């Protein structure tokens, strides 16, 4: 029988061994390195097999079969063997901000080299973009942060009852955007994505031609194409010619005349705010973020119809170019995703647009 002294010695050796080996025995698994994150905003039903929303084509066509529950976000993330991920944020800025933050902080994933591509549908101004078209944004401007009085009570001479916070009249100079009100994406990356996709063919149909004929905007009669065009993002779904005029001026005002309003969407300031914070924390690279919006409907009434009657027609799944816009979001967005994944050794540590490593800080 071993002596008490020997037993204590063996016990001590075991404890020392356990203490030294504990970090290795119970170490967390290495995070999964994600190469591309596709950000979709809504889905009508299931992720596959039914009427499509923004996520479904990506899941089905890119075989995003591995599902990672995301309890702190709106919806599970999905991943394939190539390092391509898709996440569904839910509609509105609050859903988007919380879901992107939950995903970006998830210790299961390493996003330090990932490219993020928002790929969703939007309303479009018939003066700048046509139905079924795709627009790469350089600027995303928040349309919610504002003062507002009912336009029936606004002073004579005002064009709108909506005005910047801390100002006393609409579009009062100088523009002083609040933090989180204006996002300037990487110009060179957006231009790179546009040049890569500008000749991607987008289907035109007799139905689209028929709908376009009802509008008078400078771009309304053009067939679907890929353009550079900026976005206003707000959780309020607005509609009408007067609102389009406000959005055009709002984007120009807050970007010092550099941005040109083309599309209107709901979630992207929420997603971009979280991505900016995550970039400041070193979790993502701010210079690897792209916003692509495709036009499912015009943002105003056609010739001879009131704004109210036109708005009554606007429902998800029944937009005038709903399926063509979903197809455009996938077709154009996937061209960029495929380029990144196919030549990942080229893009892993270098910017897609410059060939140089970009700073992870915004």
Image: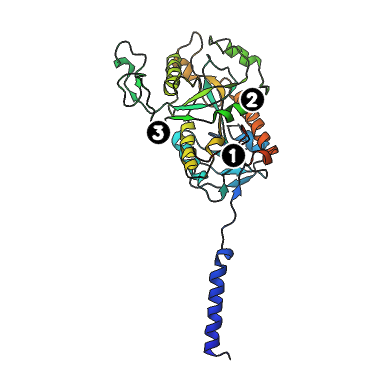
Q: Earlier in the sequence, mark 2 or mark 1?
A: 2
Q: From this viewpoint, which residue is outermost toward the front?
A: 356
Instruction: Tell which of 208 and 340 is nearer to you.
Output: 340
At horizontal 57% and vertical 73% (from top left) the residue drawn is 17
Secondary-structure class at tag 3: loop
Counting other residues with Cα less than 10 Å from the Cα at mark 2, is it few (<14), some (14-19), or many (20 or more)?
some
Instruction: Tell which of 230 and 190 is nearer to you.
Output: 190
Q: How many marks?
A: 3
Q: Earlier in the sequence, mark 1 or mark 3?
A: 3
- Residue highlighted by disc 3: 179
Counting other residues with Cα less than 10 Å from the Cα at mark 1, is it few (<14), some (14-19), or many (20 or more)?
some
C-beta proximity under 8 Å, tags 1 and 3 = no
Q: Is residue 170 left or right of residue 310?
A: left
The image's mark for residue 245 is: none
Secondary-structure class at tag 1: loop
- Residue highlighted by disc 1: 357
Number of the front mark, 2 or 1: 1
Measured as percent of width and height from the top left, residue 216 is found at: 53, 9
Above or below for 346 versus 214: below
Residue at mark 3 to residue at mark 2: CA–CA distance: 31 Å
Q: Is residue 344 visible?
A: yes
Q: Is residue 45 visible?
A: no
Residue at mark 1 to residue at mark 3: CA–CA distance: 26 Å
Instruction: Tell which of 17 and 50 is nearer to you.
Output: 17
The image's mark for residue 195 is: 2
Measured as percent of width and height from the top left, residue 325 is found at: 60, 24
Above or below for 108 versus 234: below
């Amino acid at each position: 029988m071993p002596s008490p002294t020997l037993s204590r010695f063996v016990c001590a050796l075991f404890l020392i061994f356990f203490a030294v080996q504990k970090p290795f025995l119970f170490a967390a698994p290495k995070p999964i390195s994600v190469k591309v994150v596709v950000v979709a905003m809504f889905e009508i039903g299931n992720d596959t097999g039914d009427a499509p929303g923004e996520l479904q084509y990506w899941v089905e066509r890119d075989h995003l079969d591995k599902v990672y529950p995301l309890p702190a976000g709106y919806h599970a993330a999905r991943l394939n063997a190539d390092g391509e991920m898709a996440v569904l944020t839910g509609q509105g800025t609050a859903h988007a901000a919380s879901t992107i933050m939950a995903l970006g902080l998830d210790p299961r994933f390493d996003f330090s080299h990932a490219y993020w591509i928002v790929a969703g549908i939007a309303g479009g101004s018939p003066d700048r973009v046509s139905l079924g078209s795709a627009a790469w944004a350089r600027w995303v401007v928040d349309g919610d942060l504002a003062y507002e009085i009912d336009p029936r009570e606004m002073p004579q001479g005002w064009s709108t009852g909506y005005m910047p916070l801390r100002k006393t009249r609409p579009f009062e100079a100088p523009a002083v955007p609040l933090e989180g009100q204006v996002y300037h994406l990487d110009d060179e990356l957006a231009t790179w994505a546009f040049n890569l996709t500008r000749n991607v063919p987008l289907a035109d149909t007799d139905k689209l031609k028929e709908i376009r004929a009802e509008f008078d905007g400078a771009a309304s009669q053009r067939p679907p194409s890929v353009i550079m065009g900026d976005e206003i993002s707000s959780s309020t779904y607005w509609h009408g010619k007067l609102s389009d005029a406000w959005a055009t001026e709002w984007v120009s005002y807050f970007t010092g005349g550099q941005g040109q309003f083309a599309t209107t969407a709901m979630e992207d300031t929420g997603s971009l705010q979280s991505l900016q914070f995550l970039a400041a924390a070193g979790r993502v690279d701010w210079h690897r973020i792209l916003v692509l919006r495709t036009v499912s409907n015009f943002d105003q009434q056609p010739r001879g119809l009131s704004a109210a009657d036109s708005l009554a027609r606007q429902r998800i799944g029944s937009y005038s170019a709903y399926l063509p816009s979903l197809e455009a979001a996938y077709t154009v967005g996937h061209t960029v995703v495929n380029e990144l994944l196919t030549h990942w050794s080229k893009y892993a540590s270098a910017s897609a647009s410059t060939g140089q490593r970009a700073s992870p800080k915004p």
